[in-house]
Amino acid sequence: MRCLVLLLFVAAATAGVPSDADYIKNYHELVGIPMATRVKAMEDQWLRNPLNRIIGGAASANINHPYMAGLVITMVNKAQSGCGATLLSSSRVVTAAHCWADSVNQAAQFEVVLGSQYLFSGGTRIVTTQVYTHPSYNPRISAIKYDVAMVYLPSRIAFNGLIAPVALPSAAEANDQFARAMATAIGYGRTSDTASWTLQTYRREVNAQVMNQMDCKRSWQAGTIEPYHLCTEGNKSNTNVNNVGVCGGDSGGPLTTFKNGRQILIGIISFSAPQCEQGHSSGYTRVTSFLNFITQHMIL
């Protein structure tokens, strides 16, 4: 697919230079809740008649990415929203902080979905209310700054061919920028700017190259990118034909790369431009910047 759908859009402040705007600060109401409603309604129909509509990417089989998790989110007002997440251990999951709370909406619980390509169907499902956002996260200021949260599962889950954790970067890789590395992002949803949510309700993946930090910063409005952000390139050609990136269907999902013989988590999907097929870069929370926060919450 040309664009991997995340549940989020960041409004462009100037032509060609996207920025963090109010859209993500009200993520659940404007994106997550409407998306979850449509996906839930369409999933039964999709499963009855699965069409293999792949646009610039591929369906993501559980066996290829057993660490991918979905989040069915129940808000305080009882509405349902959705996000992606990543399994780190038998009892810990990491996601974007704005999946738990944006500047307007607060989640009451997560239903963590493991071992399924679908958000509302199949797999192992665990309900939890134990979610810890980064202490510096403040969505009233910005929903993309310190955008990381740890999710505790109430009981340990058993690993199998469809459910297994991903590795974190090692101490030796903590200062690695991963610039020019090829990485894989995973999510659910639309596959282009014009595609309906009804076209794809199963998990998809897209490969993109990690940008160096200077180019990452230049590709967004001034003040958007911090050292703890990471970007992947979106423009693979001079046309929109082969552009790749995240687009609006699973905030909180993983960005991984293969290094030293293993798949490691290097980013948490955080933000994207509103027109995801136009070749803009995609934004992530940089995992190496938050290893202390993450590992503190890994202690059982």
Image: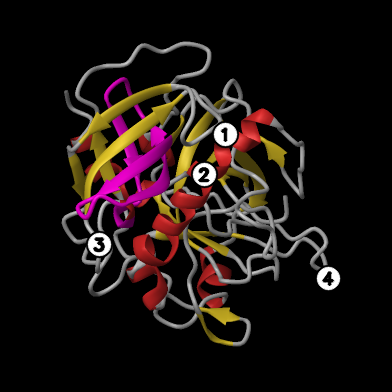
**Disc number at residue 41?**
2
Chief secondary structure of the magenta portion: strand
Q: Which mark is residue 44?
A: 1
- Going from N to C along the chain, the mark reached first, 4 or 1, is 1
Q: Nearer the viewer, mark 1 or mark 3?
A: 1
Does the residue at mark 1 contact the one at mark 2 (Cβ under 8 Å)? yes
- The answer for how far apart the CA atoms under marks 1 and 3 are is 28 Å
Judge the density around disc 2: few (<14), some (14-19), many (≥20) Cα neighbours within 10 Å.
Answer: few
The numbered mark at residue 238 is 4
Q: Amino acid at mark 2?
A: Ala
Quadrant where the C terminus is found in the figure: top left
x 64%, y 44%: residue: 200
Query: Can see residue 144?
Result: no
Q: Circle 1 sits in a helix, a strand or a loop, which is it?
A: helix
- Mark 3 or 2: in front is 2
What span is colored magenta in the figure? 70-98
Is residue 216 shown left or right of residue 126?
right
Considering every residue shown, the one lying at the far bottom of the view is: 14
Please state which of residues 244 and 127 is positioned toward the viewer in this rendering.
127
